[in-house]
Image (tube, rainbow, N blue to C red):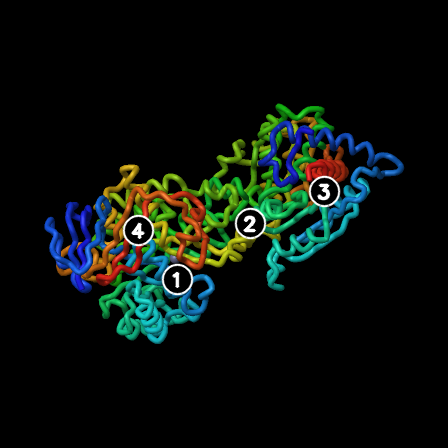
């Protein structure tokens, strides 16, 4: 086992080998999802609690299916991040559920760093399902798995990540992982959606859509996080689509076999034209499919280390 | 009642001498090489005597939030940190925006008898930034200056009028310089670490914009402004310019801003969450330079006690602030050990200048006729800053549990020993 932590908090904390190890595991689990009986007894008797302090049907469902396919008992707990209105602190909530002998927490929370905080204060294994604008490691892993399947390699690929970089945990997790794997990453988005200091990303910052897309093997369009954004970041959806959205003519600059990714849900016509969202180069549904395998791998690995 | 403190290195802002300090009642009688008769003689050979430290910026949480700190525990932490005069900010509950509360604070501190507590009154009623408080009345009750610290006065008209009004009374305004809109929901400095951690950033300009506004208002009103907890290189440039222009501006820096930078936040440790936030290495260096060059007039701790539960939460939800009274000496001594500051600088920044800014003519110097507020420092004493040392009710400091060097061995207030370790 080349992964010894009890938690999966972020790609920032992982080594190249650890990332590749999880991807290997995910490939193995992917096979199970294609069987007629999509269930193995691997985590039988384990209790997984989906602790969602921020709503997300997609990610939660994906984790729930992953847990069930491994025969774990999965329970959903949702609450708003400001459950302090009831006077209970986050750690009190966690300790309470931990006392019911839960083995793994899958945590989504609106604040950056909060999943690390939970992981440090519980005996249970913790998988980050998205913390604020910080990380969403299983999303990055499913993105990497999808890229690997389509491109048969990872090292040396050119990837553009386009959109709301500042508020995107998907972008952050992908950037940390891709840097470690030798993928060349270009970033582009409105300046209001790029951090003040981009140097820590170690990525090339493109100055327009054409330059961003040019010569790419992979284009990853990000979702505009309307809910996480102050109102002054963008004048309108229309303007965003015009200068920062991807359409067929802009795509021509990329490599002919360039794949298009999006973490979903798509704001159709804003980040991506519908034409592209549903075209052959789009691998958006593969990403969703791979999500289950990656999450099975994550749960399995974490369960083995608690 | 006389005390002779023997064998000291006695440091003032303008000189250093070896000798003995003779105290009579609450006053320094003189510095001497002789050994005159005294009722009590204390041998302090090898230790350093400095004027009792004056901390222009503390939060004592009393009245209203005594579970974090009260005037008694705050006073104890102060004297244990060598501080004999404290200026508590007005963001108590209720706010110190009237003479009744000002008087309550002073009376409680007097009863406790460890320090001089000189309240800072609020600029605006309820610190809402709208209507001016009865500043004259509060000054009569013992307030020394005015600030809505914790909250910026966002309305420039209100700040203008506050500066104009206070001029009548010869006092001054302390600016908590922060453009709230620009700071937004930021929790750390808007820089590299915000990029890495995904924590929301507070740009340096949130501070600088308000500093330049307040400087310009001080210029326009020919009034006096003191800038609290300066944290950026840009802020210091603006203050330097203002001083060169002859605008009446002074400023302070907090020990945490010259000891730590944003990198400390890579682990989401809420003990490093403070406002203004820890900035970049360059800013830290600029503050150290500013302390040396005189652009920064004073070191003030911004002692901000919080209950442990207010820090043991998600980073975004954690309270801003760090306790500081008992780490003032060790953190500042580090600068002396690294040859960034001299002992005379130390005295200038921690007592001589604050006394001047506050018009305390009897403080800030160890000299015959001055008040016997004296701090005796052992600069080489190494210890763990733990619960035995900590006198505050709160432990929200990244230094809690860590090894520190340099401590107040003896603190004398009005000629009485109020702390001995
Ligand atoms: Zn302040």
Question: Is there any visible trace of residue A249 in the rendered image?
Answer: yes
The residue tagged with tag 4: helix, strand or loop? strand
Mark 4 packing: few (<14 Cα in 10 Å), some, or many (20+)? many
At x 39%, y 39%, the residue is B281
The answer to whether tags 1 and 2 share a subunit is: no
Quadrant (top left, top right, bottom left, bottom right) of the N terminus of chain B: bottom left
The residue tagged with tag 3: helix, strand or loop? helix
Front in this rendered view, residue B245 or B366: B366
- Percent across and percent down for residue A296 are 75, 38
Q: Is residue A254 left or right of residue B181?
A: right
For disc 4, the chain is B
Q: Which residue is mark 2?
A: A234
Q: Earlier in the sequence, mark 4 or mark 1?
A: 1
Mark 3, mark 4: which one is toward the viewer?
4
The answer to whether tags 2 and 4 share a subunit is: no
At x 70%, y 55%, the residue is A78
Q: Which residue is mark 4?
A: B408
């Amino acid at each position: 086992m080349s992964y010894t932590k009890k938690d999966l908090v972020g790609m920032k904390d992982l080594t190249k080998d650890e990332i590749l190890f999880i991807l290997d595991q995910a490939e193995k689990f992917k096979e199970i999802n294609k069987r007629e009986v999509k269930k193995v007894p691997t985590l039988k008797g384990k209790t997984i609690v989906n602790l969602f302090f921020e709503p997300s049907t997609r990610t939660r469902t994906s984790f729930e299916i992953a847990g069930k396919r491994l025969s774990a008992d999965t329970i959903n707990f949702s609450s708003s991040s400001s459950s302090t209105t009831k006077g209970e602190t986050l750690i009190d909530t966690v300790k309470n559920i931990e006392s019911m002998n839960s083995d793994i927490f899958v945590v989504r929370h609106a604040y950056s760093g909060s999943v690390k905080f939970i992981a440090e204060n519980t005996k249970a294994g913790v998988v980050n399902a998205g913390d604020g604008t910080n990380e969403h490691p299983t999303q990055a892993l499913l993105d990497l798995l999808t890229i690997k399947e389509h491109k048969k390699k990872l090292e040396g690929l050119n990837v553009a990540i386009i959109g709301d970089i500042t508020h995107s945990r998907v972008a952050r997790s992908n950037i940390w992982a891709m840097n470690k794997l030798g993928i060349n990453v270009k970033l582009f988005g409105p300046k209001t959606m790029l951090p003040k200091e981009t140097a820590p990303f170690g990525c090339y910052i493109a100055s327009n859509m054409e330059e961003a897309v040019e010569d790419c093997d992979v284009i990853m369009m990000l979702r505009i996080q309307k809910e996480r954004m102050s109102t002054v970041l963008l004048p309108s959806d229309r303007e965003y689509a015009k200068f920062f959205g991807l359409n067929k003519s802009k795509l021509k600059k990329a490599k002919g076999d360039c794949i298009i990714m999006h973490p979903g849900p798509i704001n159709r016509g804003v980040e991506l034209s519908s034409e592209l969202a549903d075209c052959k180069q789009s691998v958006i549904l593969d990403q969703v499919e791979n999500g289950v395998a990656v999450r099975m791998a994550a749960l399995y690995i974490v369960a083995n280390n608690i | 009642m006389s005390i002779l403190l023997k064998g000291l290195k006695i440091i003032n802002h303008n000189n250093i001498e070896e000798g003995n300090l003779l105290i009579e009642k609450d006053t320094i009688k003189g510095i001497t090489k002789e050994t005159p008769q005294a009722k009590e003689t204390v041998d302090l050979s090898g230790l350093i005597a400095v004027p009792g430290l004056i901390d222009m910026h503390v939060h004592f949480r009393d009245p209203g939030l005594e579970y974090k700190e009260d005037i008694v525990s705050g006073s104890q932490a102060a004297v244990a940190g060598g501080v004999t005069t404290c200026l508590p900010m007005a963001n108590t509950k209720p706010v110190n925006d009237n003479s009744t509360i000002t008087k309550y604070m002073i009376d409680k501190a007097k009863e406790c008898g460890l320090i001089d507590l000189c309240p800072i009154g609020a600029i605006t009623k309820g610190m809402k930034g709208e209507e001016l408080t009865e500043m004259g009345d509060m000054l009569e009750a013992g307030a020394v200056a005015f600030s809505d610290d914790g909250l910026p006065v966002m309305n420039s008209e209100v700040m203008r009028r506050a500066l104009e009004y206070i001029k009548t009374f010869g006092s001054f305004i302390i600016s908590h310089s922060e453009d709230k809109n620009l700071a937004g929901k930021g929790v750390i400095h808007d820089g590299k670490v915000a990029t890495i951690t995904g924590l929301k950033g507070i740009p340096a300009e949130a501070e600088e914009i308000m500093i330049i506004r307040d400087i310009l208002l001080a210029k326009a009103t020919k009034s006096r402004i003191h800038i609290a907890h300066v944290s950026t290189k840009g802020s210091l440039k603006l203050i330097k310019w203002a001083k060169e222009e002859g605008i009446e501006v002074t400023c302070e820096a907090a020990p945490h801003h010259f000891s730590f930078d944003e990198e400390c936040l890579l682990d989401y440790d809420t003990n490093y969450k403070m406002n203004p936030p820890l900035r970049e290495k360059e800013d830290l260096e600029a503050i150290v330079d500013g302390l040396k060059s005189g652009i920064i007039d004073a070191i003030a701790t911004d002692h901000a006690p919080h209950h442990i539960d207010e820090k043991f939460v998600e980073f975004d939800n954690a309270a801003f602030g760090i306790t500081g009274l008992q780490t003032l000496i060790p953190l500042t001594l580090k600068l002396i050990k690294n040859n960034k500051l001299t002992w005379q600088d130390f005295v200038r920044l921690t007592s001589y200048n604050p006394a001047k800014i506050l018009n305390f003519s009897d403080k800030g110097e160890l000299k015959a006729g001055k008040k016997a507020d004296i701090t005796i420092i052992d600069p080489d004493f190494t210890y763990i800053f733990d619960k035995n040392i900590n006198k505050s009710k709160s432990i929200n400091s990244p230094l809690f549990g860590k090894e520190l060097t340099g401590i107040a061995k003896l603190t004398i207030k009005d000629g009485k020993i109020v702390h001995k370790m």
